[in-house]
Image: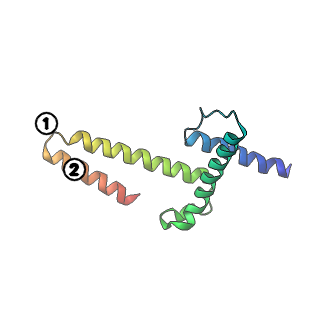
Amino acid sequence: MKLYKLRWAIETNYYEQKTFWSLNAYRIRRQKGIEHRVNLANLVHSSLKMLPYLDEHFAKYQNASPQELRSHISWQIQREIFFCTLVDKAQTTKNPTDLVQVLCKLASSTSEVA
């Protein structure tokens, strides 16, 4: 039972990593492909385990699961894309300068908080 619990944790993490990195449609047909896929999943998992110890910005995730850190990183990426897109769309000649300045200030203040 102990070994099964360990394997289940690995399988679950492997599935989540595959989903997070958009490798769902990745189909394997040869042994070399299987090895590459397993190595990629292990590399990502190891990186997520080491990152909290290497970067103090992520230090609060030292005792957390890799899935929690992955979710945090995913949220940060989505937020940055949203704000960058918002600011880019606002920077047109039709928009008043005040609106662009407010959006730039909002984007910079939220990135400082993160």
The crowding category of the residue bearing disc 1, from other C-alpha atoms within 10 Å (few below 14, some 14 to 19, many at least 20), is few
Instruction: Give the number of marks.
Output: 2
Q: How is the image coloured?
A: rainbow
Which percent across, then down, holds residue 67? 60, 50
Nearest the camera: 14 or 60?
Answer: 14
Name the residue rendered at 58%, 56% in the picture. Answer: 48
**Residue type, label 1:** Lys
**In this view, the mark in front (1 or 2):** 1
Residue picked out by circle 1: 94
Q: Is residue 19 left or right of residue 83?
A: right
Name the residue rendered at 19%, 51% in the picture. Answer: 101
Identity of the residue furthest to the right in this view? 1
Name the residue rendered at 42%, 44% in the picture. Answer: 78
Which percent across, then down, holds residue 46? 63, 57
Give the answer, above or below, for where 55 lies relative to 66: below
Image quadrant of residue 88? top left
Name the residue rendered at 28%, 52% in the picture. Answer: 106
> How far is mark 1 from mark 2, CA to CA?
15 Å
**Residue type, label 2:** Val
> In the drawing, what numbered circle is on residue 102?
2
Image quadrant of residue 18? top right
Nearest the camera: 43 or 56?
Answer: 43
Which percent across, then down, holds residue 6? 78, 51
Asked if the residues shown at circle 1 and circle 2 are in contact, with their CB atoms under 8 angstroms apart, the answer is: no
Q: Is residue 65 left or right of residue 106?
A: right
Q: Considering the numbered disc 2 on the image, is that residue within a helix, a strand or a loop?
A: helix
Marks 1 and 2, the one that precedes in the sequence:
1
